[in-house]
Amino acid sequence: MKYKTSAVRAHKERNEFMKIKVRLLCSVFLLLLLFTACTTKVDTSSPKGITEAFLASMQKGDYQKACTYAGIEFDEKTYEKSAALQKELMKETYANMEFEIGDETVKEDKAIVAVTVRNSNYIELLNDAIYQTMKESEDDAYTKKKYRAAMKKADKKELEVLVNYRREKEKWVFDGSNSQLYAAMLGYLQ
């Protein structure tokens, strides 16, 4: 009888070990699949690829990387001096952005990329949230709550802009400020 109990227990332990092993292998497989799907490389040697990488980095809140793609310098000091509320809500607004990269036109050392950007109007939503906060004599937490609720309900404006590039030292970089792109990313271009 003791032999049967030991054999049954050993069999159960092996079954439990196999279940854990299968779960672990499935988890590793899913993580690898997810990692592979998330690390699709964009060809950043072309203006079209740079535009896509720039916008994707902005969506993720990696502003320094976005600036590197665009060939512009990230102003860390100015960013750090910005209000925490503004940085947080702007990051959420960029994350809310949708975009489609259109045609690329290259003529010698100049290029233009058409981009369609959809997003809610950051300035309008923030102004309304701040107004409500002041009206109710509340704090930044209230502003965030009002802003997030309004962003969920807000329609996204669809805007098409042209991103300008120039070739500088065999590399494509933003040509000019591309201010229309930045305005479209925050949904306030008219």
Image: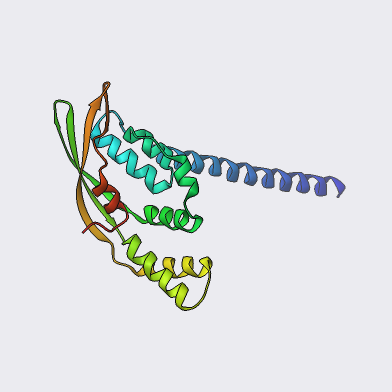
Q: 143 or 46, which lies in front?
A: 143
Relative horizontal placement of residue 3, taking residue 58 as reference (left or right)? right
Decide if residue 153 is in sight here: yes
Quadrant of residue 90 in the image? Answer: bottom left
> What residue is rendered at 53% in x and 69% in y?
139
Relative horizontal placement of residue 61, taking residue 49 as reference (left or right)? right
Q: Image quadrant for the C terminus?
A: bottom left
> What residue is rendered at 76% in x and 44% in y?
10
Residue 70 in the image, given as x and y percentages of width and height: 32, 35
Relative horizontal placement of residue 51, taking residue 13 as reference (left or right)? left
Is residue 122 placed above or below 80 in the rendered structure?
below
Is residue 46 placed above or below 138 in the rendered structure?
above
Q: 80 or 109, which lies in front?
A: 80
Residue 35 in the image, given as x and y percentages of width and height: 46, 39
Residue 69 in the image, given as x and y percentages of width and height: 34, 34
Extreme residue in the right direction:
2
Extreme residue in the bottom direction:
136
Q: 1 or 156, which lies in front?
A: 156
Is residue 175 placed above or below 139 in the rendered structure?
above
Extreme residue in the top direction:
169
Decide if residue 151 is in sight here: no
Relative horizontal placement of residue 131, taking residue 168 as reference (left or right)? right
Q: How is the image coloured?
A: rainbow
Residue 122 in the image, given as x and y percentages of width and height: 35, 60
> What residue is rendered at 70% in x and 43% in y?
14
> What residue is rendered at 54% in x and 43% in y?
26
Q: 84 or 187, which lies in front?
A: 84
Total labels drawn: 0
